Image: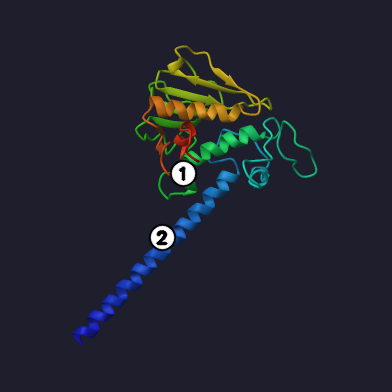
Amino acid sequence: QQQQQQQQQQQQRLEKEKAVFLLAAASNAIVTHTRLISLLRAELPRGLLPVTPPGYVARRVAELAEGSCVAEFKHDAGGDWGSERWSGDLPNDAQLMCYLFCAFLETPGWVFAREGVATPEGSRGGASGGGGALYFATPPPPHVERFAAVLSTRPPGMIKENGCAVVMPRSAAPAFAVYCGAVGDDAPRVFDGPNGVWRALCALALHARERNGGALGTTRVASANVALDSVFMPGRLL
């Protein structure tokens, strides 16, 4: 009888562990679905893209995902919407790629963790990964000197040596301004044309690699699920 009770207790424990596992899996699925919806509504992180009709980001991302190397990419335009041709009221592809880069920094490997949801103020509330905080849309407080940022407006004041910010264009003209304190003045470096967004983001990653210990917020640029470090190492594949 004692052995039978032990078997029943073990069976109950196994059933309880299974139930906990299923609940955790369901919770993760709900969180992933919710945050994926937010991402495709241009809300993760929010404040970078101009006001966009519901559904446009999801549809354009699907179009750009066809083939390889975003073959349909148009730096100064985008996709048609409904029966209308693309216009400057919609984000261009350069803005969209910059936004997706920021979203990826929030969710490396597109793993949507239950803890640490992205906020408008910065990566996981401005959390640090050894290289300073990561901010999106709005600039960091004046006392923060070590940071990386992708902003919607020019950062106020002089950026310190360990700070770097990319300013996303708010108009159809895809010119990205990069402010890095290491330059020694407050004049930005402007990247435009078909490769403007890629060069601006490379500048942000390079500054993190050289000045901030190889980290963008909580994300290590050399980690396996990000592999940004390979951009600066000839002979390695992304």
Q: Is residue 45 left or right of residue 131?
A: right
**Of 6 and 212, the residue lying toward us:** 212
Q: Residue at x 66, y 38 (%)?
A: 52
State which tag comes first along the sequence, 2 or 1: 2
**Of 118 and 132, the residue lying toward us:** 132
Q: Quadrant of residue 56?
A: top right
User: Does the CB distance between marks 2 and 1 fall below 8 Å?
Assistant: no
Can residue 155 be seen here? The reply is no
Give the SS element for disc 2.
helix
Q: Which residue is mark 1?
A: 108
- Type of the residue with mark 2: Ala
| Applied colour scheme | rainbow
Q: Is residue 150 left or right of residue 220?
A: right
Disc sitting over residue 1 in the figure: none
Q: Residue at x 53, y 22 (%)?
A: 178
- Type of the residue with mark 1: Pro
Where is residue 217? Give x, y as percent.
41, 34
Query: Neighbour class for label 1 at 10 Å: few (<14), some, many (≥20)?
Result: some
**Position above or below: 190 against 36:** above
Q: Is residue 33 left or right of residue 125?
A: right
Q: Quadrant of residue 54?
A: top right
Give the SS element for disc 1.
helix
Q: Residue at x 34, y 70 (%)?
A: 16
Q: Nearer the viewer, mark 2 or mark 1?
A: 1
Q: Which residue is mark 2?
A: 24
In the image, farthest residue toward the front? 235
Q: CA distance from mark 2 to mark 1?
A: 20 Å
Where is residue 173? Give x, y as percent.
68, 25
